[in-house]
Image (cartoon, rainbow, N blue to C red):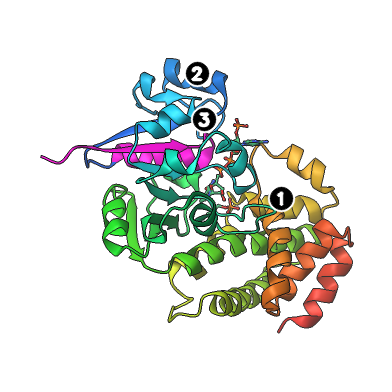
Amino acid sequence: MDEATKIAVIGGGSWATANVKMLLDNPTEKEIFWWMRSESSIEHLKKYKHNPNYLSSVEIRVPEQNISSDILNVIGQSDMVLLNVPAAFLKEALGQVSAETLKGKKIISAIKGFVPDDNMIIAEFMHHNYGIPLQDIVVISGPCHAEEVALEKLSFLTIASLDIELATRFANMLNTRYIKTNVSDDIYGTEYAAVLKNIYAVASGICHGVGYGDNFQAVLISNAIKEIKSFVDEVHPIDRDIKESAYLGDLLVTAYSQFSRNRMFGNMIGKGYNVKSAQLEMNMIAEGYYAANSLHQINKIYKVSMPICRAVYAVLYEKHSPHIEMRLLAEQLS
Ligand SMILES: NC(=O)C1=CN([C@@H]2O[C@H](COP(=O)(O)OP(=O)(O)OC[C@H]3O[C@@H](n4cnc5c(N)ncnc54)[C@H](OP(=O)(O)O)[C@@H]3O)[C@@H](O)[C@H]2O)C=CC1
Ligand SMILES: O=C(CO)COP(=O)(O)O
């Protein structure tokens, strides 16, 4: 009989908690190890079987001895490492982790962000900085909010890897009554689209915050998917259907959902909060803030026309007025 797969989940936020729930609810044999930075959350989780700060209604039955703030210990016991901290804090989280620590392990990224400064998607970052072969990397994406996983609302995920067998193996560890999976070999397109959609969700929130209605939102999002297509086709030109749920679906859910953190953040910016106060107001991280800056740097190379991303960058990093910037943007959309 095959040994149970050992999976290290790295991160203690909402999506990590949702991922642990999906893995536990799926019947394939596996053992979960869980790293999070907060000792008090670990104590609470061990005692009460609930994460105190994120998806706190979800019961989590990971064996006590498998939950730890010692990342080397958690990774050391696993075959697969599921990365699930916001991209801005990934380097800090992996501070003690070396290429040797990760040698031979499959890396699963559930992160939707660029690593700041390096301005890389996670697959590229793990390949370049830790020597992980690209075919050992899996990306989890798709339109799926942690909050709806907690409620067991039907959700679809796309599991992408250059190694389709590996993608399928991991997908089979997530499928449940409420989770359906597709597999894809488009790791670049899946990751870039997932990161970009966060910037468009911020744009959607800003527009709402300054007073635009649903009519304009629809135009904004129609233009956003065109920008995503132009960018991913330029960076990684393969035959892909941008209408698939990993691309268009992810954009739609984040731009329209009440649960979207990026939209919530953008909405506060549109209403006049500055970046610091909007971040402080949220208990959660809006990746789109960091992504807007990284994309701005990356696009100096590719030079794709992306007026929506440009406008978000101008509001967040050049302190342009959201009102004026959205009015100027509206003149460029059709
Ligand atoms: N939430 C969702 O529905 C989905 C999220 N994702 C992606 O998952 C990734 C993780 O996001 P998510 O789980 O939502 O995050 P949350 O916003 O729910 O939680 C924030 C996490 O970041 C940690 N954190 C905050 N500040 C710092 C810091 N200064 N240094 C180190 N860690 C810090 C928090 O740790 P602590 O609690 O100790 O402060 C916590 O684990 C992101 O890339 C996101 O885009 C992808 C799909 C869906
Ligand atoms: O990626 C996500 C949903 O697929 C979550 O991001 P938001 O919370 O900003 O929508």
The stretch in magenta equals: 1-25
Earlier residue among tags 3 and 2: 3
Whether residue 94 appears in this view of the structure is yes
In this rendering, position of residue 254 left or right of residue 148: right
SS assignment at label 2: helix
The residue depicted at 67 percent of the width and 69 percent of the height is: 217
The outermost residue toward the left is 1
Q: Which residue is mark 1?
A: 265
The outermost residue toward the front is 100
The stretch drawn in magenta includes residue 88: no
Percent position (x, y) of residue 279?
74, 42
In this rendering, position of residue 3 left or right of residue 132: left
Q: Which marked residue is nearer to the observer: mark 3 or mark 2?
A: 3
SS assignment at label 3: loop
Q: Which marked residue is nearer to the observer: mark 2 or mark 1?
A: 2
Q: Which residue is mark 2?
A: 44
Earlier residue among tags 2 and 1: 2
- In the rendered image, the quadrant that contains the N terminus is top left
In this rendering, position of residue 289 left or right of residue 276: left
The residue depicted at 57 percent of the width and 75 percent of the height is: 235
Q: Mark 3 Cα within 10 Å, few/some/many (few <14, many 20+)?
A: many
Closer-to-camera residue (215/233): 233
Q: Which residue is mark 3?
A: 36
Whether residue 57 appears in this view of the structure is no
The residue depicted at 70 percent of the width and 78 percent of the height is: 303
